[in-house]
Amino acid sequence: MTEFRIADIQVSTVLLPFRFAFKHSLASRSFSQNVIVQVKLENSAGATISGLGESVPREYVTGESCNSAVDEIEKNFAPMLAGQTLADGVSPTDAAAHLLEAVAVANNVYSKRIGAAFCALELALLDACAKAEGIALCDWLAKRKDRWPDQSIQYGGVIPFGKRKTLSALLFFYKLYGFKTVKLKVGDDSELDIFTVRKARELLGNRVVLRVDANCAWNYDQTVEFSNRAKGFNIASIEQPVPFDRLDELVELTKVLQPEIVVDESLCTVDEAEKLAAMKACRGFNIRISKVGGLIAAQKIVDIAQKNRIHVHLGAQVGESGILTAAGRALAVANSSFENYEGAANFFLLKEDLTRENMTAGWGGKAKMPGGNGIGVTVDDRHLGRFVMKQPAANAAQDTAAIEATRRGLHV
C-alpha cells in the first residue's frame, strides 16, 4: 500500500452571504463566517492529493469564533499532524483516524467545547485520505459499523422566526415541496409561538410531523406551559427548551412531558453525551458534526445514543456549505435510520455555494450521497478564493447588521 505523508495544512476563513436573514431566539444573521482547512498528502513519488474540511464556529453554541478556531488549529492541532507519515500496512483512512484520535485525546476534544476547530481539520484529512484510498467516506464509516450505507435519506424543513405572512408563505412552500417533517423556531413570544404551531398544523395537515426548537429561550415552567397549550397540535419534540447548563430541568421535563425532549446546545462533546445519557436528561440528541468535533466524535455520540435508546437527529449549522452538508449526510447514510434529518437547504439559503455539486435536498426532502470519493464533493480553488477573507472579520458585527444578535443562553 502506498505510503503518504501529511505535507501541508492550510487554514482560511470564508464569508458566505445569505439570500435572506435567518433568525431564532439566540441569533439573527445574513451571512456565515466558516473555517476551511485544506490538507495535502504527498506520496513517495512526490505526487499530492488534497482534501477539504469545513466548520461553522458559533460563540453561542460552543463558545468558538472563527478567530479562536483558527488559532486552535494552527497552534495546537496542526503541529501534531504536519509531517506525520500515515502508518504503512494500514489503509490511509484508518491510519488517519488513529492519528486524529490521538490528537483529539491529547487536546481534550471529547470533553472541551472546541469541536468546530477540530471538525474542519479532521474532515480535511479524512477527505484527502479517502480520496487517496479511492473510497467514499460514507462507505468507510459504514464499514466500521459493519453495514452497507443507506441509499438515501429524507430531510425535514426548518422555519426560522419571521412575520406572520412570511410564516404562511414558508409553510405553503414546504407543503408543496413535500417535507414530511417541519421544525419551527419558537421562544420569542408565547402568543406568537402558539399562533405558529396552530398555523403550521392548519396548513400542513395532520400527517406532517411538527417539532419545535426554543434555542434555550424558556425555563421549566414556560416549557410546561407551552406543552400544555400546544397539546392539540401534536408536537413530536421540543428541542433545547432551557439554557444548556440546566440539566436538572431537562431531566424533569423528560419525565413529565409527552413530546420528546431533544438536546442541542447542551450536547457539544462526547463526554456531554455520556452525561446526558446517564442522567436520562433527554430522549433525543441533535448531532451537528461541526459543533461536536467531526465525524469520529459524531459517530461516538451516535453509538452512545443507540446504546441508551436515545433517538438521533441529524442537525446542521446555518450557513454551512456543501462540504459540511456532504459530511453530515455521510454520517447519516452510514448509520441506521435517524429520527430526523436537517440541513441541505444550500440553494435556498446561500447566494452561492462552494461546491460544484448541488447538495440541496430534492422534492420531498429526498437526497443521496454524491458519487465522488472522500466527502464526495469538489471545490474549485479559484471559486473558493472568491470567498476567502484575508482575516476573520473581527469587526464584522460592527459593519453588518446581522451576525450575532445574541440575547440569552450564552455558552462562552
Image: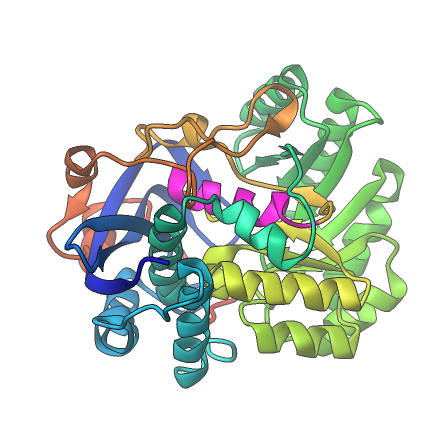
- In the picture, the quarter occupied by the N terminus is bottom left
Locate residue 264 relative to residue 351 in the image: left or right: right
Magenta-drawn stretch contains 334: yes
Indicate the position of residue 381 as horizontal and vertical percent values. 18, 38
Residue at 58% from the left image edge and 35% from the top image edge: 159
Q: Note whether residue 112 is visible.
A: yes
Judged from this view, the residue extending furthest toward the left is 390
Q: Nearer the viewer, residue 354 or 177?
A: 354
Q: How many marks?
A: 0
Among the 4 quarters of the image, the one containing residue 6:
bottom left
Among the 4 quarters of the image, the one containing residue 4:
bottom left
Locate residue 328 relative to residue 349 in the image: left or right: right
Q: Nearer the viewer, residue 379 or 223?
A: 379
Indicate the position of residue 65 as horizontal and vertical percent values. 32, 64
Q: Answer above or below: position of 37 versus 16.
A: below
Q: Answer above or below: position of 410 versus 32.
A: below
Indicate the position of residue 195 as horizontal and vertical percent values. 71, 34
- In the picture, the quarter occupied by the C terminus is bottom left
Locate residue 158 relative to residue 84 in the image: left or right: right
Among the 4 quarters of the image, the one containing residue 278:
bottom right
Q: Nearer the viewer, residue 183 or 14?
A: 14
Stretch of the chain drawn in magenta: 322-335
Residue at 20% from the left image edge and 51% from the top image edge: 48
Q: Note whether residue 412 is visible.
A: no
Locate residue 291 relative to residue 148 in the image: left or right: left
Residue at 69% from the left image edge and 65% from the top image edge: 303
Indicate the position of residue 30 as horizontal and vertical percent values. 34, 39
Judged from this view, the residue extending furthest toward the top is 176
Q: Answer above or below: position of 155 versus 255.
A: above
Q: What's the magenta bit mostly, secondary-structure-wise?
A: helix
